[in-house]
Amino acid sequence: MFGDCHIHMILDGIYYRDAIDAHKGHVCDELIRAVLERYARAGIRYLRDGGDAFGVCQRARILAAEYGIEYRIPCFPICMKGRYGGFIGRTFETMADYRALVAEVDRNGGDFIKIMISGLMDFDRYGVITSAPLTEGQIHEMIHIAHGEGFSVMAHVNGADTVLAALEAGVDSVEHGAYMDEPVVRALTACGAVWVPTLSTVGNLIGNGRFPDEVLERILDGQLRNVAEYARLGGIIALGSDAGAYCVYHAEAVDDEHGYLHRALGDDTDDLLAAGEEQIRSRFRRDL
């Protein structure tokens, strides 16, 4: 069974505010253990959390050992104040603030840095991303600072130009990566970063009535085409579902994500995903 290289323990796949509120003020071990038990029963032994500002992923890493699960964390996602991610991460205004957050991750034993450099896909409008991305200069400086402290960088990023800026800055993994064009797919292949496309965040919404299916299907089809081309070019791809996102449920989302990836990768799916997970496991840790 594959691991899940992108989850959020704090979220439940239903409603993010209620899920976060359940841990505010006091992290709830009972909720964390229930989720870890689901992963353990499913035979999932590796999890990479995208982090949260409330201490849930840090507690989950401690408890995960009891379930035989290797659990890697960034402590919290880092985002610029006023941009996407503030509901779950820690924010900064200046690069001095950002450096202080990176140092805090270091003190708290984080395994890598997670940065938020774009918004989400707008599932009502094809091609639209929900908030402005960071500038090329900001992206470069953030990744440079993290690398200088010995961290790999996991980046939430959508949009061809913004993905390209992250690649040129040396990002280690691209999370989501919606709306890449062919030149950016080739650049992603050439740079050796790992792509975690989180197809379940789109595919699992189709048919539930919240968003227009024609928009969702168009987004998913584009992602599947890019995944197929990326694999054909020799790119490194890993299974990550973004479990905890709306309609993406812990443990069962591994099968969902595998199914979507199989549509693009065919008979080579398992070999490609095993190689990608090995890359994630080796790059996103600091206890070597």
Image (cartoon, rainbow, N blue to C red):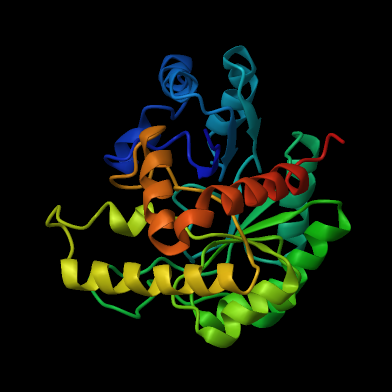
In the displayed structure, would residue 90 be above or below residue 194?
A: above
- Identified at 57% across, 72% down, the residue is 232
Looking at the image, can residue 26 be seen? no
**Is 273 on the left-hand or right-hand side of 197?**
right
Q: Nearer the viewer, residue 48 or 263?
A: 263
**Is 69 on the left-hand or right-hand side of 82?**
right
Which quadrant of the view contains residue 143?
bottom right
Point out the residue furthest to the left here.
Answer: 209
Residue 202 position within the rendered picture, expressed as x and y whole percent measured from the top left: 32, 59
In the displayed structure, would residue 122 be above or below residue 277?
A: below
Point out the residue furthest to the bottom here.
Answer: 183
- Identified at 72% across, 76% down, the residue is 190
Which quadrant of the view contains residue 21?
top left
Residue 111 position within the rendered picture, expressed as x and y whole percent measured from the top left: 74, 41
- State the count of labels: 0
Q: Nearer the viewer, residue 61 or 43?
A: 43
- Identified at 15% across, 56% down, the residue is 207
In the displayed structure, would residue 273 be above or below residue 235?
A: above
Residue 175 position within the rendered picture, expressed as x and y whole percent measured from the top left: 54, 59
Point out the residue furthest to the front here.
Answer: 267
**Is 233 on the left-hand or right-hand side of 140?**
left
Residue 276 position within the rendered picture, expressed as x and y whole percent measured from the top left: 64, 52
Looking at the image, can residue 186 be seen? yes
**Is 53 on the left-hand or right-hand side of 65?**
left
- Quadrant in which the C terminus appears: top right
- Identified at 23% across, 73% down, the residue is 215
Q: Nearer the viewer, residue 265 or 133?
A: 265
